Image (cartoon, rainbow, N blue to C red):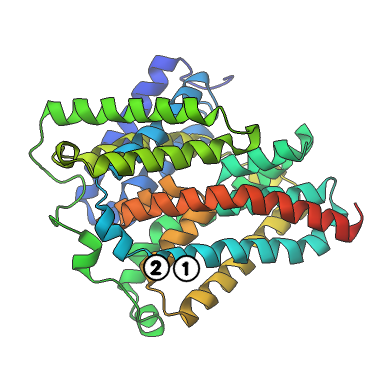
Amino acid sequence: MDNVIFSSSGSLIAIIALIVALSLYLQKFKAFKSIGPALTVIIFGILLSNLKIVPTMANVYVVIFQYAIPLSMTMMLLNVDLSKMLKLSKQPLLAMLFAVLSVGFVSLLTGFIFAPKLNEGWKMAGMFVGTYTGGSSNLTAIGTGLNASAETFAAANAADYVIGMPTLIFLFAAPAILKKSKKFQKFWPYSLSEDELLGEGHEELMSEKEWSIKDIAWLFAIGFVVTEIATLISTMAPGTLQSAVRILLITTIAIALAQVKPVKKIKGSIDLGLYVALFFLAIIGFMVNLKDFFGSTMLISLYILSVIVFSLLLHLILCRLFKIKYQYVIVSIVASIADGSTSALVAASAQWRSLVSIGVVLGAIGNALGNYLGISIAYLLKTIIGA
C-alpha cells in the first residue's frame, strides 16, 4: 500500500468501476473492439499498478475476488440450455481431456529435468499441473496438500505470473487474430459457424438491449444465494478439494436453475455476468508486477515456460488430429491454463455466446481433475527421482 497515489477501499472501487466503464465505452473503436473489454481492462490495470497509482494488493481486492467470479459464473450459466449444450459436448470435452493429459504428461517429463535442481521441485511439478489444468486455486490447493513451504509458494506464484500472464493475454487476443488469419483457417479448417457461435437471439454482448431493474435484481439475488449455498456445502469437503467442490456446485446449481421457465425469462444474464467479471480482471491487472519478470527465479520460469509451450503443442497436435473445431480448442486451453470463468470471459469477449457456459463447465472439470492429477504427479515424480 506504500508509495501509491490511491489506497483507500473507496478510491480503489471507484477506479475499478471507471476502468470497466471506460473499457466498455472504448469498444466502439475498432482497435479496442479487436482485443475485447476483458483484455482492455487487464491492460489498464497493469498500467495503473506499475505506475504506482494503485497498489498491487489491498483488502478490497480480496472481497471482490471472493464474490465477483462466483457471481459472474452463476449469471452466465443462467443462459444455459442444457439440451443444446449436451449436443455440443463431445468435442469440447475431448479437447479438455487432451488439455489435462497434455499438462500432466509434459509436467512429469520436464520434472525429470527441473525438479532435482529446485528446492521442493517435485512439489512444484504437482502445483504446476494444478494451475495449468484448473487455475491458480489449484496451485494453492495442491501446494497446501503437499505441505509446500512459503518460499515455494512465493517462487511458484511469481514465476507463474511472469510466464502465465502473457500467455493468458495472448489467448484473450487469439480469437480476433485467428479469425482474420487465412493461413490459420487453411491449416485448421474446422470451425463453428457464426450462427452456432452466437446461439439463439444473435444479440451482441454489451449492445443496447431492453431489460429492467427487476432482471438485474433477480440476477444478483440468484448469484449471491447460489454462491453462498455452494460455499457452505463445499466446507464439508476435505480442505484441498473445497475450491473444486465449490466451483462444481455453483455450476450444477446454476445450470439446474437455468432450466426453470421463470429463470429462462430473465434477461441480460451474460452481459451482467461479464460486467461483474471485469471487476475481477481489473484486479488481475493490478497484481501484475512487471519487475517480477526480472526478479523471479529464472530456472522456475524456464520450467513453467517448458510446461506451457510443450503441453500446448501436444494439445494442439491431438486436437488437430481429431479435427476438433478451433473455438473449442481455445476455450479448453484457457479453461486449463486459467479457469472456467476466464474461459467464459474469452468466449464472451469473442462474441462466442454459445461457448460461454461450456467454458465454465470445462474449467470446473479441469479444476476437479487437476487436484487429483497434480498430487499424483508430484508423488510419482518424488518416487522416481528419490526426492
According to the picture, the residue beneath numbered tag 1 turns out to be: 94
Q: Which mark is residue 90?
A: 2
The answer to whether residue 127 is left or right of residue 187 is right
- Residue 40 visible within the image: yes
Kind of residue at disc 1: Leu
Q: Is residue 157 left or right of residue 58?
A: right
Which quadrant does the N terminus fall into?
top right
**Cα distance, mark 1 to mark 2?**
6 Å
Q: Position of residue 348 (x, y in %)?
A: 30, 51
Residue at image position (47%, 40%) is: 247
Q: Residue at x 17, y 52 (%)?
A: 204
On screen, residue 59 above or below 131? above
Please report the residue visible at 35 percent of the width from the left and 75 percent of the height from the top.
181
Q: Are marks 1 and 2 in contact (CB under 8 Å)?
A: yes
The type of residue carrying mark 2 is: Lys
Residue 339 in the image: above or below residue 150:
below
Q: Nearer the viewer, residue 134 or 227?
A: 227
* SS category of the residue bearing label 1: helix
